[in-house]
Amino acid sequence: MLPDLRPVSNYSFKWTSSDGNILDGNSLNALVDSKGNYNLKITDKTNYCNRDSTIIVLEDRTKPTVNVGEVNSILFCQSNSVILDGTKSSSGVRYTPLWTTVDGHIVSGQNTLSPLVDKKGTYTLTVNDLINTCTSTADLLVDEQSSLTSIFEGSATLLSVKFADKTTGLIQSRLWNFGDGLTSTELNPEHIYTKDGNYKVCLNVTNECGSSESCQEFRLSASAVLTISNWQVQNVSCNGGTNGSIRVIAGGGTPPYIFDWDNGASSSELNNLPAGNYNLVLKDNAGNTYSQSFTVSEPDAIALSSANITHSTGAADGSIDITAQGGTKPYTFLWNNNSTNEDLIQVLPGFYSLKVIDALLCERSFGPFEVKNLTGTNDSHLATHVNIAPNPAGGMSRISWYFGERASAKTSIEIRDAQGTVLQNWIVYNKPFSEINATDFVPGVYYIRIKNAEKEISKAWVVQ
């Protein structure tokens, strides 16, 4: 475009436009932000000759398409990951997709339209147009199917009851059992009974994680006699706990009602109850009374019906075989060596503790159980002992040992954690003791192994 090959500094440049917008137009290259016709005038500073040229700028602000569907994705109980579907979005060499999340987790495929994710949360798909640099975004919620807890309410008027399912979570099916031989799969059914009586109504909800059922008692009458028309007892979840509750609804008679419980309470709902029997006298405004008793129960305490220990020969060949009972099955087991098996096998000598957790998250600890080192001998010249003092320790402890009159002069010492990892080891010559500092370790149980040519003994050492 220049008239000759002289330096650019010999020329001045002026961009103008009648229908566009120039942000910077005093150089050979202009910066514009809208479509239009742009004219460049170049003037020779020496002879003031000039030349004009027009450039047409077109506009392409078309944003790419982003489509992640209208239905949320779900992580099911039987599959802990899901592939998100953004394949209806703009694709091809012109476009680059990117998935991001703040509260979820992308396993793979972040730069594809179909990533694999394994955590609930909000996922954002951004598609970028490499040519016009326009971008579009869309969010997709990934929900997680979890175990359900059936909850419902019922409001009775004479023989008619309106039910409402208050269960939270992803429900695949529900079944109402009205206690009179009839059922329903509706969300919030209304049921009319044909005669007076006591009816146990249950709601069962199900998804891939399993089913949950809750029941309430309803006493219905076509007359307006004072009564407890509906009640629900929530039993204590853990033995010795206090999370039981009783909820009652009065019916008939002449409102308002007075609730007189034998524990001094005066409301229609009792919470934080231990197991036991609770008696209620219901009174109405006309002086009528109605009495009813309720029982809050609790499961048996978690216990061990047996604990059989096979002691060690000094190697990892000990075992602890336990049998749990009580609480609410199934159980989860957690040993202090991080094992989650019911029984321990192939363990070193030492002390082991166990926590048993039931299905309602009630827990109880047992132990410590000692797996002993059975490396004793009847030969007096090989009589052995190992002592650690103080134990438990918060500072220095001394390890002393005696491996018999003919023991070798070289002794190796090894400290392992509860998982069997060697943390420290050293060798002692010509003396029957050594010292260790508890401040070098975090609080917990450790196992110290003393070994020479004749013997090997392990003892537990507790750091406070």
Image: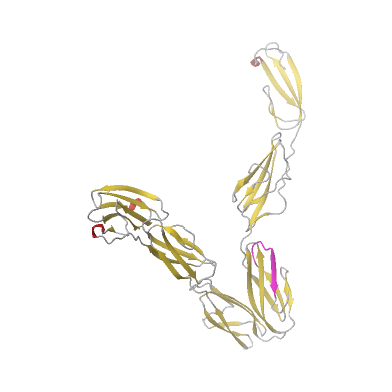
Answer with the quarter of the image where residue 384 lies. Answer: bottom left
Of the pair 404 and 52, the residue shown nearer to us = 404
> In the rendered image, which quarter contains the C terminus?
bottom left
Would residue 11 be found to the left or right of residue 396 on screen?
Answer: right
Can you give x and y, in whole percent of width and height, for residue 177 in the image? Answer: 69, 74
Can you give x and y, in whole percent of width and height, for residue 108 in the image? Answer: 61, 45
Of the pair 451 and 28, the residue shown nearer to us = 451
Q: How is the image coloured?
A: secondary structure
- Magenta stretch containing residue 243, yes or no? no
> In the rendered image, which quarter contains the N terminus?
top right
Would residue 20 be found to the left or right of residue 250 on screen?
Answer: right
Magenta residue span: 167-177
Q: Residue at x 55, y 78 (%)?
A: 296
On the question of residue 389 being in view, the answer is: no
Answer with the quarter of the image where residue 15 lies. Answer: top right
For this orientation, the residue located farthest to the top is 47
On the question of residue 305 being in view, the answer is: yes
Can you give x and y, in whole percent of width and height, for residue 344 in the image? Answer: 45, 61
Of the pair 87 and 253, the residue shown nearer to us = 87
Can you give x and y, in whole percent of width and height, for residue 292 in the image? Answer: 59, 84
Q: With respect to residue 210, does 401 lie above or below?
A: above
Answer with the quarter of the image where residue 403 lies. Answer: bottom left
Would residue 378 be found to the left or right of residue 4 on screen?
Answer: left
Q: How many marks can you see?
A: 0
For this orientation, the residue located farthest to the left is 405
